[in-house]
Image (cartoon, coloured by chain):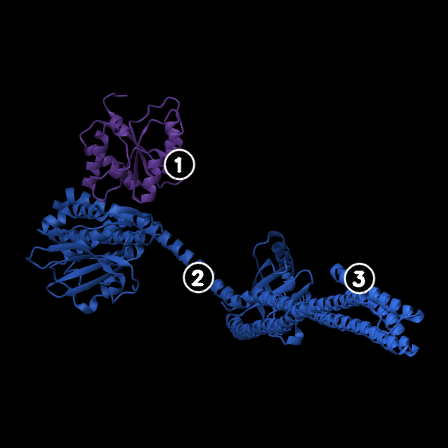
Amino acid sequence: MNNSALHILLADDDEDDRLFFKEAIDEIKVKTIVTLLNDGVQLMLYLNQPDVVLPNVVFLDLNMPKKGGMQCLKEIRSNSKLKDLSIAIYSTSASEHDIEETFVKGANIYIKKPNDFGELKKILAEVININWQYHTSGLNKENFLLSI
Amino acid sequence: MKRKIVKLSIPYLLTTLILSIFLLVFSAAITYKQFLELTKAEKRVVQSHKVILTAQELLSTVKDAETAQRGYLLTRDTIFLVPYKDAITYSAKIITDFKKLVGNNPEKQKAIDTLDFLIHKRFDIIAASIFKKDIELPLFSVDKKSMLSRKDLVDKIRSKTNEIIKNEKMQLKIRESEHREEVHLSPLTFLYTSLFALSIFVIAFFKIKSDLFHLKLANNQLLINKRLFEHSENISNICNWCWNLEANHLTFSNNIHYMLRCEKYDFKQTVEGFSKFVHPDDQHIITNGVKEALEIYKTAIVYYRVIRKDGVICYFKSESKVIQDNFHKNIMIGVISDISEQHHNNAILEEKLFDLERTNKELLAFNHVASHDLQEPLRKIQNFISRLDANEMESLSENGRTYFSRIKVAANRMQLLIDDLLAFSRANKAEKVYELKDLNILLKISIQELAQSIEEKYATINTSALPSLNVIPFQIQQLFINIISNAIKYSKANVAPVITISSEIICGKDIIKSSFTSENKLHKITISDNGIGFDEEYAEDIFILFNRLHSDTEYYGTGIGLTICRKIVENHNGYITAEGIPNVGSRFNIYLPMTE
């Protein structure tokens, strides 16, 4: 594995969203490795592989069949091996309820899927460039929801 | 008040009674005592007279004896000796009677003894002279010396007698004066006492009369109250009962007959008599209620059904408790009310509540559909549009590009609609968390969010100090945003919008148009602009969902914004009105209750 490349993982059941995500990442001038998974079950299987190299950031959709993002978040945070993963919620919904709950459950940032491709690119660039160490320590509810 | 008067009179009357009895006994005692005194005094007077008479009699007896002596000495006829002998016998008897008469008075006894001695001496001398004469004695041979001694003796007797009489007369005089005094005093005392007692009786009579009058008044009031009570029981469909637990005597007020739609003879005033009307399934409730009231000594409330005489099932509520009457006897009292109507209304309310909950659930489901399921495809459409816009425009024909821009506008409009609907459903949602917030800060945030359009339209916003209130912060922000963005949107072409926000405190009753009639103070926040305004007749319509005054081609909008505003203000127990003058401007008045 190339050390300088950023390892990014997306769990999203929507094919179009996965496509937009991949295209936007590709257009950002950062060296990345992108893993795309279709649902929560696949995500947990992937993360629980014994010899897995953990991704730098996990983008997690909330509304997925089989196993939703909320459930995955819960499992990740209660797993000693995975609990330090950086998790960005990546959802169509921006309801107060979802934001509140994911924050409480320990997500690092909340991204509302944008309507515009250009905006998507901007947001992803922003997230990728975040110094996670710093962001996590200064985490609070005001900057939890990312807005560009 | 009247009860108090009656109550106070009882000790008063008792005192009067005791006082009168005392006075009567007192006056009787005095009269009796004085009568005794009087009798005694009279006796003494009589005695004194007797003493005087006796003394005089004694003296005259002595004189009789002397006369007899003289007669004998002169005539020597023994016939004269008869009165002499009689006098001796009589005087002895008189002396004995005399001694008895004066009683234990030693002074008088002594005087009588002296008198007795003198008389005996005199009689002895007489006797001596008579018997001497029997032997031989010349008629006038009496020597002068013995004659003088005899005269002296007689004088002594006379003076002694006179002394006794004088003493007795003096005593009599004193007694008579005492007697007079007593005879004079007794009726006076008796008269005064009687008068006093009489006046007390008169006062007591008037007092009792006035008490009786008050009692009568109180009785009358009681009667009126009873009628009133019966009337109100009848109107409010309640009745009361009272159960003397010791005597096991139960009484119901008259309205029970009406409540059970039965005649007096249908209803027996006993526990069993009432239970007869209670629904068979609810009998145990009555039993338990009675038990509860007896045990806890607090008001026990039970609900149960009764079957009226006309067969209708009614819902009754009984509140009962045990109290102690004035004689410290336990009695259970209670009120029965017919709550069938409330019960019926409650059922309707419950049904409505159920409907409301269902509607709410549907609304939440709609919220979810709008927020997620509808947005999802739209977002993708917009994403694809932006992809096409960025990369593929050159390969489209002129027509294609026009159609494409139309698609873009339609998609944006749909986005706006969904966002507004979401905001509306959020404003409707029940989660109302109020915080004390400075409205100046909320307004500032709202203005910041509108910074872009303010800049584009060169809008000026004048603000003045706003109060701090208990509000749902994000909703108030939304309220400001909606009204200010409206003011910017509906501005006149080529005239930079000027928006003025001000606040004042007013009285609730000053708002004629609204439902506020309370005296409570309110904050009135006014947001006015110099825009295109609107016709006054639409002042209410603009708040109705999806109602718009302008077409999309003129002014772009969804017709939801002001509906949200009204909803938000209502969430804060407030009221919003709009005023407009075409081509001059519009003004929104927000009334919010003051935070206590």
Callout 1: 10 Å neighbours few (<14), some, many (20+)?
A: few
Residue B165 left/right relative to A55: right
What type is the residue that disc 2 sits on? Lys
Residue B29 left/right relative to B535: right
Disc 1 is attached to a residue of which chain?
Answer: A
Q: Position of residue B11 (x, y in %)?
A: 58, 64
What type is the residue that disc 3 sits on? Asp
Q: Colour of chain B?
A: blue
Q: Position of residue A41 (x, y in %)?
A: 40, 34
Q: Quadrant of residue B355?
A: bottom left
* Mark 2 and mark 1: Cα distance apart in space: 37 Å
* Mark 2 and mark 3: Cα distance apart in space: 132 Å
**Residue indicated by mark 3:** B113
* Mark 1 and mark 3: Cα distance apart in space: 150 Å
Label 2: state its secondary structure.
helix
Badge number at residue B130? none
Q: Is residue A49 above or below residue B160?
A: above
